[in-house]
Image (cartoon, helix red, strand yellow):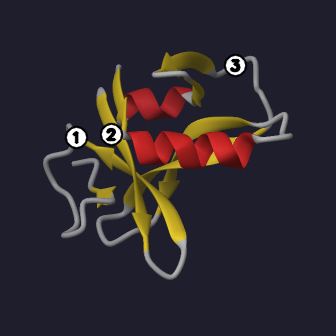
Amino acid sequence: MKIEIDKKAEEFIQQSLKNSEKIPTLCVVKGGCAGTMLVLKLLEKDENNKIVIVNNLKIAIMDEVYLYTEDISISIRRGLSTEIVVFNNTATKKCRCGKSFSKL
């Protein structure tokens, strides 16, 4: 699986991890305009999840993520709040903003 993370998102995640035992974990959730989203959550370490290192950041990947994509990019959006955004680069049907996709 290919995972790219931009520098600002990496720095934000590293800051969020200070004094935490949790690990950033890629998950699949129902939601968004197109029905399915990939999200990055800070969760307790689970031995069943595969761990990858992207730049200097350890990321866990839940098994179900592999059913939806082979290419992910992670970035940050700042506005009234800061949001980590995960894009499924292999999805052919996406919502307008690109955050959610259809599994068809």
Give the Cα distance between marks 3 and 1: 25 Å
Numbered disc 2: secondary structure: strand
- Tell me the residue that label 2 is attached to: 73
In the image, what residue type sits under mark 3? Asn
Q: Earlier in the sequence, mark 2 or mark 1?
A: 2
Counting from the top left corner in percent of width and height, residue 5 is at 39, 36
Mark with earlier residue (3, 2): 3
Q: Disc 2 vs disc 1: Cβ atoms closer than 8 Å?
A: yes
Badge number at residue 89: 1
| Numbered label attached to residue 48 | 3
Residue under the image location 60 percent in, 44 percent down: 13
Residue drawn 76% across the image and 25% down it: 46
Across and down, in percent, residue 64 comes to 50, 33
The CA span between labels 3 and 2 is 23 Å
Q: Nearer the viewer, mark 2 or mark 1?
A: 2
Dot 3 crowding, Cα within 10 Å, few <14, some 14–19, many 20+: few
Q: Quadrant of the N terminus?
A: top left
